[in-house]
Image (cartoon, rainbow, N blue to C red):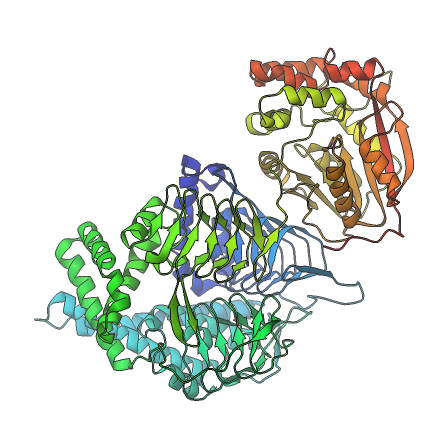
Amino acid sequence: LLSPQNVKDDNLFSWNYYRWWFLNGLWDNNTFWLQHILGTPLCNCYLRLCGARISLDAHVYTMIIDAPWLLDIGDGTWIADQTILNSLYFNDNNTFALHSVRIGCRCSISTRSILFGGVHMQDNIIVQPMSSVTGFITSRTIIDGEEHKSVSSDISITHSNRLLSKWHKIYQVITVISLICIHCTLLAIVYKVYSVEQIPLPISIAFCWTLWSITACFVTLFLLKFVVGSCAAGETYPIASWSYLHKVWLRQLVVSSFHHAWLLPTGYDYLYPFILRWLGAQVEDDVKLANIDIFLSYPTNLLKLETGVTTFGYVLVVPTEITLSGDHRVDWITLGSHTNLANGCSILPGSHLASHTMVGNLTRITRETNSNSGDVFIGVPARCMPFQMPIREAMEDQIKITQFWKTCVSHYISKCLLIGIYWSCGLISGSIIHTLIVCSLYQRHFYADDETIQQIIGKLEEDHRIFICSFLGNTQWLIRYFRACGANIGNNVIIPDVSSLFDYHLVTIGDHVRLNINAHIVCHTFEQRILKLVPVTVGNSCILMSNSIVMSGCKLMGNNRLYPFTLVMKNDLLQPNTLWKGLPAQSYVAKSILSRSVLVCDDIVKYQQKSNSSNRLSLWYEKISSIYTNVNELQFMNWGYADLDEHIDDNSGYYSKKLYQQVLANISLTDQNVLEVDCGRGAGAAWCTRTYAPHSYVGIDPSRDVINLCEQTYSTIPRLSFMIADPKPYLSLQNESMDVVLSIETTNIFDEIEAVKKFVNEITRVLTPNGYFLWCGLCNLDGSGLLIDYLTTNNGFIIKEKVNITRNVLHALDSQSNSRADFIDRYIQPTDQEYCRLLAGLPGTQLYDNMQQGRAEYWRVVFRKKTTKKTPIV
């Protein structure tokens, strides 16, 4: 009933949606325990049990996965911590889809990268930190932000051995068992305190909880200083080495294992600088850190924080950087005086920031970042803005340092209250009362004068987020909680986590808004440590994809989509019906909602105009993909090619295969990168891959249902992949990455010159010099047509071969007419059968009669791209 294989694309809030929600909830609430086996073969075995196809020699360090059963990861691939493997995709029509994530061998996916929207990566690919990846990626590519760079064959990438030895694996298992023993010992110690008689239970458990947190923090520091130790600047560690396991893997394991203990101190705790100094960091005065665990994960002896440094939430100090050989390098990080690190920024080894530097939200700083005093950086990679950060004036600092003893007292009191609520009221009633208390105290958290009261309220809210809200993500119960806290939220809104919104009482969200994981709406800023609050409005039907941020004062007017790593700056206004991406956000050319195009003919255009619904344009293909799933009948959807003496009607796709043979007659696909536009049900792509052995074969289609069926049917065929794409506005493929582009009866919008221009520009861009574009379909009597004419007149292509095959196509249609008519009678509703017969080219329909009576012809054409044509840059 709840098997991952039964989770299909469907409407939001449908049974299929809640199937996914239940499985995703099970996964999310196990992530703390799974953190102990990250980077080990045990993690890969667990992923296999969840349905993933993953090599035991892969190195997976992330648990941010929303559909693990859709993963396919090859040998030697390394995936860093906080990488998002995002299969869930919210469509614009209140439906959702789940896409597969396929990663080849020996790839390196750096931290905070996002793989979304259907991904197929080949081998030896490096993804730099904070990059977004979607679609098909060819081998030997470096992805840096939005930029894709091919690596020449004389440069070796990811050649180092990543196979852990038997002794490496034994070391990992022994280490994990040792940590478990340490946890058991700590629990045994605090149990001795709990067993003391004549102490009320809430007081006893609260004291034990606080004692465990303090003790576990000391154990963490002891292990980091005396077991893990320090690192030397510039050292490089291969993944399959003792140095990497001891200096990198073990450090991350220790910090993540004791993560909950470090919830004891609040943000900007007084002890944070002292702790880092004791561990070897160079920390000067007036340093304020929102979190310490990100610094503990870094080799602390390589940290230098000068006077007045301030960090905010979700800042990441990346422990290592990836080299071209796939190894990991450590180095110094220096943050100059009065440097500010904003939400979600990442600092890589080798970074050096001058004094009074401001690093913006979602910004990546590397050793290549040249910093001068007062610079403001935004972007991936970081770009210096044309304005500077003003020198901080002497004024009251609103970021207060918290004394550790006050933190312990507030922690103890909050745990007494928490346990007392559940002890006296029970689990269910206690949860309700806990929620009511948190909602009623939410506003007072901001306005309470007493620091201890603020901390107690904050701890109760934190416990509520952990124990209750973690189960409410992506449901309407979480929306009700936000409303109770003062947020103004419309109907049918989906928010994945309670941490997605800040300053609830200042948030206004319309109907049908969707947030992906790690998308945030923030109504506050700290400008030179001064808190400023401004409301945010998000209009109806907006979609915020992963790691997008809407800052204070912004207004999204409605039907806006923010792509991953999009930063909507303070007080920005986004016009309705627009797409946005980038840092800062920039308007993105909208992709129109597609329907399958029909064959070129004036009569077809007239027929389309008679249709009451544009969805009927894609009816033939949609009906087959969504209703009919028996791959033994009508696998192919093209009209076919037959020799004039052949008479076969066996449902095997014989004539359709012959049409592919005709189009490919004089072109070799062996070891070539091939793209098929509008691949239909994928049978042709699968047959070509098996028959011609290309290096890679990518089938694209605008229909999500069609691509889902292709992936389900042909996912086991090597070198073959499918992706949802529209060839008109944009193909998510690299420049000059395809040797052959194949277009079988695509019929694409060839009645509009602007659409043809966009289509040809994209085909020109992705084709290699001297690459081939192979096309077949209906055209005018002389073999001309808008597409053919434009391809030849814009000096981008030359015609190598052009053949009229009308008679052969008609004969194929005659031979297949009985089986196709029978299929339509059995599976297509009577009201739609006439239209499907037309698109199937059955005898007696207008398309068939036009060819038979000489009003239209069917041609196949071989175009070759000219080498003198300069490829458009995107």
> Quick one: quadrant of the C terminus?
bottom right
Left or right? Give the position of 208 relative to 688: left
- Residue farthest along the left direction in this orientation: 198
Instruction: Write down the quadrant of residue 331 in the picture.
Output: bottom right
Left or right? Give the position of 154 relative to 71: right
Left or right? Give the position of 781 relative to 271: right
Left or right? Give the position of 221 relative to 545: left
Query: Is residue 32 visible to us here?
Result: yes
Q: Position of residue 2 (x, y in %)?
A: 41, 39
Q: Where is residue 296 in the image (x, y as percent from the top left)?
A: 44, 77
Instruction: Write down the quadrant of residue 717 in the picture.
Output: top right
Along the viewing direction, whichever of 756 and 26 lies nearer the viewer: 756
Along the viewing direction, whichever of 496 and 846 lies nearer the viewer: 846
Along the viewing direction, whichever of 352 and 807 lies nearer the viewer: 352
Q: Position of residue 306 (x, y in %)?
A: 48, 86
> Quick one: quadrant of the N terminus?
top left
Residue at x 35% of width, y 57% of height: 506
Q: Where is residue 425 in the image (x, y as percent from the top left)?
A: 14, 54
